[in-house]
């Protein structure tokens, strides 16, 4: 007999306005709890998910009550489980996820069960938004030329993902060349409301990129997570999260003519960084919302990571519904979305009186106060108004080296360097622009700023202005829709005339894929210590990110990118100094080429049409010729190529049986690494380039890979052999066993030899010895990375004993079967006199039923020390994972048992 759902009594039928039914839904109003009316809209989405998924194991009625009582519980940092409606993956993060699914199928097969039962349990959208390296720019053929190079570099990975798209159900793979994941999510993938098996519920998504938050502009709750959390969600497991505080951000008024959404988002980013919103939701509301297009909202939501929030959320209103129709969603779908959200008190209607919602704290901005601005030269929240730009630039030249300083001596600030460009005499000085890129999902999904940039180009061309030929200009739309409306408007040709040819559809300059500068330009910069500038419509401008030779990097709206390209320098006062000289010898000023808001609105109205979205996305899953010509196996079981250095079968399920292995203690383990405080996932996880002397480099060279073809750790995330060798390979690793020496080495305790961490770990494994890690506070802080837990597991680490853990990393360790333990308050390795040369034993009960979340365990060393630690299994679900040896074996056994 089926167990009754705890909230069956509030499962209601949603009627269609003209008769018939949309489906059933869990009705929040039918809880008859006055606290719900005061909840922020973003918290209501968490509440509905908890109610719908309540099974009193993974999600309990106590969890539901915590969310209902948000006003009182959020300040206490309580944890809740959350099951998102879907998962969003990208190329790099998609590969290890598909590798794990393929391995799980092999394990099911080996256990004599139906391997085809392994499929994502929630919808997975995998967008191969391959990063476009701008090798070719300022050319009519740039798109195809750059695409050819990308396929040469990534053919094996692309082929593997194409196999996955056919082999697994519930997984949509969007081929390369289609656009940037977040823009495709906004324009096409976002459901807003799901209709699955007759049940209606809000769309929510976790994605493996921090800018997943862009979808919050559509009223879909979404944010970035690490790979293990994404895989867990994909397999139907709950994510543990702290119930967040919510900052209410009230918008009033209207933007002045000529002020862009980019100006607004840079202003909002600065305000929220100052307010402090890390770990919180930000919810936007107020009468100013009616003046913000959906694309403007998405621009603000996209930059949530830059202002530090988990989400920048815009509840669904009439503007959202209009956008859904514009982007080709059917009238029936939009009607269902509106009816459901209204019925469940998740729709905000600004024509009606508003119930006062409660927020943790509040901010307010009058849109009329926003001024044209840029951010830089090294951080996204260092906003500079356009009228102050010249003064600020000179202050940066004067100031000591730092976020706002380059320390250029006064006598050198006006230095002019002569060089030859293609046989023509040229000059460069501090502040000259060498990269001007219209790039990044932040802005390329917004028709008003894209068409605004095109209008600037037209006015400039009409007046006879040109961009210097050595400035590397590029335009990388986030989807094919942008190309359609630029052509429809007749304005693309003007962007081309200024060198802003389309280079591809994907992430480019914003993530450092600027490509090389001209050799003569590069030499002039590097040999004369010139502080050259890049201006880009991106979301991040940290030092060294955009290009090694551009020390000053400014974030700006697409039309400002064009304006600065024309000026050729950031050392300019646009109000008083001319941008250039026109064809009649007349000086041309910024005001002569800047379009009014009315001009932009008119061209948006006439050029951005619903059919463009429909045509683009009807074709998107059909792929492109290069994708379609990729030959992949048709089998649902993957045939592993043992010679591949990109895709390799990991040993997660080696020797797996149907019986869970049960809890494992630790017996006479050696200490692999002894750390202090603040060891981040960047220290642990393989990242960046593969060093020529590293174990990973040795592995690749032994297999005939030339050094120039090493590629990055990111590109090889589907090969556990490479990634295990890259774990703890950070050159800035501080390991106390090395007594002051910095680097990716450790001491093999039995012999006293200094070895790479990987070599030492393999030597311990070969002799049958367990290892543990000693650490200080905040172990695993920083971005969540799946390999920060997978890597140590493959190295044979059985437990980590730390003063404290970053929340998600602790959860990831449990997911990979590693025991997280915390020293007691006031104790650590140092106070207990531990050197890391001891052998450690941790005795655990043989049955998981004898272990309680948060109970103590005793650690005993071979030199007679004994101390208590708290076992950081925080929930019954985590204990179940540990009993099974990790989350993936747990899921496999559950699927097999469910079949029987």
Image: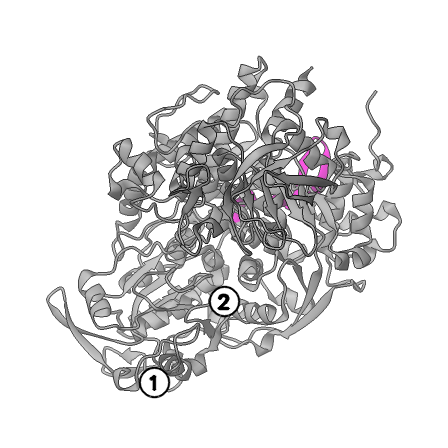
Q: Residue furthest top?
A: 112
* Quarter of the figure with the N terminus: top right
Q: Where does the image place residue 371, in percent across and percent down from the top left?
A: 52, 77
Q: Where does the image place residue 173, in percent across and percent down from the top left?
A: 48, 35
As drawn, is 687 to the left or to the right of 873? left
Q: Is residue 188 magenta?
A: yes
Occupied quadrant, residue 511: bottom left
Q: Where does the image place residue 38, in percent across and percent down from the top left?
A: 81, 59
Q: Secondary structure at mark 2?
A: helix
Magenta stretch bounds: 187-204
The vertical placement of 875 against 641, above or below, is: below
Q: Where does the image place residue 149, in percent across and percent down from the top left?
A: 28, 43
Residue 282: which numbered mark, if any?
Answer: none
Mark 1 or mark 2: whose residue is earlier in sequence: 2
As drawn, is 235 to the left or to the right of 442? right
Q: Is residue 636 visible?
A: yes
The vertical placement of 96 against 273, above or below, is: above
Instruction: From the image, tell me which residue sits under label 1.
Output: 577
Q: Residues within 10 Å of mark 1 (few under 14, many from 20)?
A: few
Instruction: From the image, tell me which residue sits under label 2.
Output: 262
Q: Residue furthest left?
A: 423
Q: Residues within 10 Å of mark 2 (few under 14, many from 20)?
A: many
* Quarter of the figure with the C terminus: top right
Q: Is residue 190 visible?
A: no
Residue at the spot 64% in from the left edge and 65% down from the top edge? 290
Q: CA distance from mark 1 to mark 2?
A: 23 Å
């Amino acid at each position: 007999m089926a167990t009754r759902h705890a909230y069956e009594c509030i499962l209601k039928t949603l009627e269609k306005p003209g008769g018939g039914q949309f489906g059933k839904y869990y009705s929040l109003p039918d809880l008859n709890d006055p606290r719900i009316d005061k909840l922020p809209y973003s918290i209501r989405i968490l509440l509905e998910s908890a109610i719908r998924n309540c099974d009193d194991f993974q999600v309990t009625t106590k969890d539901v009550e915590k969310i209902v009582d948000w006003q009182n519980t959020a300040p206490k940092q309580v944890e809740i489980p959350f099951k998102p409606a879907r998962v969003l993956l990208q190329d790099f993060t998609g590969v290890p996820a598909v590798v794990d699914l393929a391995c799980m199928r092999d394990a099911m097969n080996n256990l004599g069960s139906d391997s085809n039962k392994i499929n994502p349990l929630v919808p997975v959208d995998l967008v191969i938004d391959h990063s476009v390296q701008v090798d070719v720019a300022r050319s009519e053929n740039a798109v195809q030329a750059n695409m050819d190079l990308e396929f040469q570099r990534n053919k094996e990975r692309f082929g593997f993902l194409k196999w996955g798209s056919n082999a697994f159900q519930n997984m949509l793979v969007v081929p390369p060349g289609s656009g940037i994941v977040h823009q495709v999510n906004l324009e096409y993938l976002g459901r807003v409301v799901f209709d699955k098996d007759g049940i209606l519920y809000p769309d929510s998504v976790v994605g493996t990129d921090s800018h997943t938050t862009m979808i919050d502009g559509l009223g879909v709750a979404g944010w970035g997570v690490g790979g293990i959390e994404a895989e867990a969600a994909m397999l139907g497991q709950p994510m543990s999260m702290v119930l967040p505080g919510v900052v209410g951000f009230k918008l009033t008024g209207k933007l002045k003519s000529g002020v862009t959404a980019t100006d607004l988002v840079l202003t909002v980013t600065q305000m929220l960084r100052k307010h402090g919103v890390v770990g919180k939701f930000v919810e936007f509301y107020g009468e100013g919302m009616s003046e913000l297009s959906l694309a403007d909202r998405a621009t603000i939501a996209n930059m949530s990571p830059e202002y530090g929030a988990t989400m920048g959320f815009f509840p669904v209103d009439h503007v959202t519904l209009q956008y859904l129709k514009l982007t080709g969603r059917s009238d029936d779908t939009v009607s269902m979305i509106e009816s459901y959200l209204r019925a469940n008190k998740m729709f905000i209607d600004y024509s009606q009186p508003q119930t006062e919602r409660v927020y943790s704290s509040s901010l307010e901005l009058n849109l009329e106060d926003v001024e044209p601005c840029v951010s830089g030269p090294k951080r996204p929240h260092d906003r500079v108004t356009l009228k102050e730009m010249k003064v600020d630039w000179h202050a940066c030249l004067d100031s000591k080296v730092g976020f706002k300083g380059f320390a250029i001596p006064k006598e050198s600030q006006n230095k002019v360097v002569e060089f030859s460009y293609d046989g023509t005499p040229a000059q460069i000085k501090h502040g000259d622009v060498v990269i001007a890129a219209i790039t990044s999902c932040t802005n390329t999904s917004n028709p008003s700023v894209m068409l605004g940039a095109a209008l600037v180009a037209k006015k400039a061309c009409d007046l006879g202005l040109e961009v210097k030929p050595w400035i590397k200009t590029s335009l990388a739309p986030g989807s094919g829709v942008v190309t359609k409306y630029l052509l429809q408007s007749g304005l693309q040709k003007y962007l081309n005339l200024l060198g802003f040819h389309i280079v591809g559809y994907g992430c480019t300059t914003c993530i450092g894929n600027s490509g090389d500068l001209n050799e003569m330009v590069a030499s002039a910069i590097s040999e004369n210590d010139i502080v050259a500038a890049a201006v880009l419509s991106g979301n991040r401008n940290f030092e060294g990110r955009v290009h090694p030779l551009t020390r000053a990097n400014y974030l700006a709206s697409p039309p400002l990118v064009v304006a600065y390209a024309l000026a050729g320098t950031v050392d300019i006062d646009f109000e008083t100094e001319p941008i250039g000289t026109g064809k009649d010898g007349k000086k041309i000023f910024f005001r002569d080429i800047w379009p009014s808001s009315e001009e932009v609105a008119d061209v948006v109205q006439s050029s951005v049409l619903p059919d463009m979205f429909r045509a683009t996305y009807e074709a998107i899953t059909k792929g492109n010729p290069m994708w379609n010509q990729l030959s992949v196996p048709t089998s649902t079981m993957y045939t592993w190529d043992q010679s591949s250095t990109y895709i390799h079968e990991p040993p997660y399920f080696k020797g797996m049986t149907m019986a869970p292995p049960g809890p494992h203690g630790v017996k006479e383990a050696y200490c692999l690494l002894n750390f202090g405080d603040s060891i981040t996932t960047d220290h642990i996880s393989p990242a960046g380039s593969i060093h020529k002397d590293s174990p990973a480099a040795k592995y690749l060279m032994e297999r005939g890979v030339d050094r120039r073809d090493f590629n990055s750790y990111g590109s090889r995330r589907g090969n556990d052999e490479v990634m295990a060798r890259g774990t703890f390979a950070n050159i800035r690793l501080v390991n106390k066993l090395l007594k002051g020496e910095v680097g990716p080495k450790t001491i093999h305790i039995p012999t006293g030899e200094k070895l790479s961490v990987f070599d030492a770990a393999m030597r311990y494994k070969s002799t049958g010895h367990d290892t543990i890690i000693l650490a200080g506070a905040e172990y695993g802080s920083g971005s969540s990375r799946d390999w920060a837990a997978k890597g140590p597991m493959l190295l044979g680490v059985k437990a980590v004993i730390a003063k404290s853990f970053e929340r998600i990393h602790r959860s990831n360790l449990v997911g990979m079967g590693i025991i997280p333990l915390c020293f007691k308050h006031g104790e650590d390795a140092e106070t207990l006199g531990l050197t890391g040369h001891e052998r450690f034993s941790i005795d655990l009960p043989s049955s998981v039923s004898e272990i309680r979340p948060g109970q103590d365990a005793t650690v005993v060393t071979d030199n007679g020390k004994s101390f208590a630690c708290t076992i950081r299994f925080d929930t019954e679900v985590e204990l179940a994972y540990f009993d099974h040896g990790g989350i993936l074996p747990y899921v496999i056994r559950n699927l097999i048992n469910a079949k029987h």
